[in-house]
Amino acid sequence: MLTHAFQNHFEVAVLLAGDADYVPLVNRVKSLGKIVYVWFFSAQKDGLGSGLRLASDAFLSLDSQFARNWL
């Protein structure tokens, strides 16, 4: 993601992850003027790091989509 952001290959990135280890990546990509959306399950028990949710430009919870399509 970071390499492609530096090379200006995209304007918007979608990260399907919940680990707070991605916060520095999200912040750096955003500092390059890119928009970063995070899509993941909304509960911390499911692995969502609160810092990642806050670092993103927008967060989409996959809870309802998962329930509707997989249960």
Image: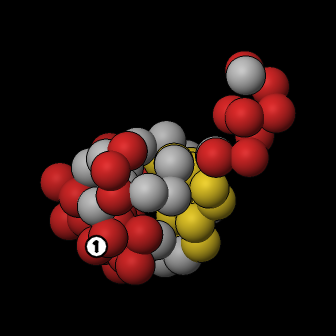
| Residue 32 vertical placement versus 11 (above, below) | below
**In front of the other: 22 or 47:** 47
Residue drawn at point x = 58 percent, y = 66 percent = 59
Residue drawn at point x = 64 percent, y = 46 percent = 62
Q: Secondary structure at mark 1?
A: helix
**Which residue has dot 1 on it?**
51
Whole-percent x, y for residue 66 in the image: 69, 34
| Residue 66 vertical placement versus 18 (above, below) | above
- Label 1 crowd (10 A; few <14 / some 14-19 / many >=20): some
| Residue 40 vertical placement versus 28 (above, below) | above
Amino acid type for the residue under numbered disc 1: Gly
Whole-percent x, y for residue 60 in the image: 64, 59
Q: Image quadrant for the N terminus?
A: top left
Q: How is the image coloured?
A: secondary structure
**In front of the other: 43 or 1:** 43
Whole-percent x, y for residue 45 in the image: 32, 50
Residue drawn at point x = 54 percent, y = 76 percent = 57
Q: Image quadrant for the C terminus?
A: top right
